[in-house]
Amino acid sequence: MWLMMQQTQPDDYVVATGRTTTVRDMCEIAFRHVDLNYRDYVVIDPAYFRPAEVDVLLGNPGKAKQGLGWAPKTSLEALIVMMVEADLRRLAA
């Protein structure tokens, strides 16, 4: 964000890994971090599935890489673990 604010012209940048994943994969990573099986806790309701016209959702960080020299430093797995740990700290407080 700081790099974006330092530009002489305002512009839009996508901050992303350029990697696609599923909600199911994210649940597996999060629950595995606390030694649980997500299938025991998550209810999947097909009514909330995305419409068929959405093939792939993928953020392209190319403009941020080229224009700002930005590249992601945190993997998806590490980010999910950080989020789970933050929730665990909040629950413990």
Image (spheres, rainbow, N blue to C red):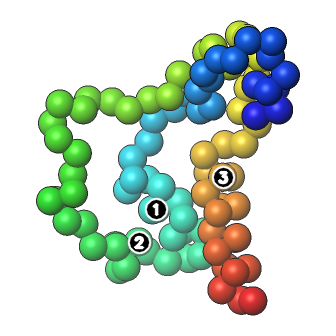
- Which residue occupies 64% across, 74% down? 87
Q: Are marks 2 and 3 in contact (CB under 8 Å)?
A: no
The residue that mark 3 highlights is 79
Could you say where residue 52 lies in the image, as x and y percent from the top left? Answer: 15, 36
25 sits to left or right of 66: left
Within-10-Å neighbours for mark 1: few <14, some 14–19, many 20+: some
The numbered mark at residue 47 is none
Q: Which residue reaches farthest bottom?
A: 93
**Above-or-below relation of 83 to 9:** below
**Percent x, y for residue 16?**
59, 32
Mark 2 residue element = helix
Q: Secondary structure at mark 3?
A: helix
Q: Position of residue 32 (x, y in %)?
A: 54, 68
Sequence-first disc among 1 and 3: 1
Q: Quadrant of the N terminus?
A: top right
Q: Are marks 1 and 2 in contact (CB under 8 Å)?
A: yes
Q: Which residue was labeled with disc 2?
A: 38
> Which of the 4 quarters of the picture holds residue 93?
bottom right
Residue drawn where x is 82% and y is 32% of the image: 2
Q: Quadrant of residue 17?
A: top right
Which of discs 2 and 3 lies nearer the camera? The answer is 3
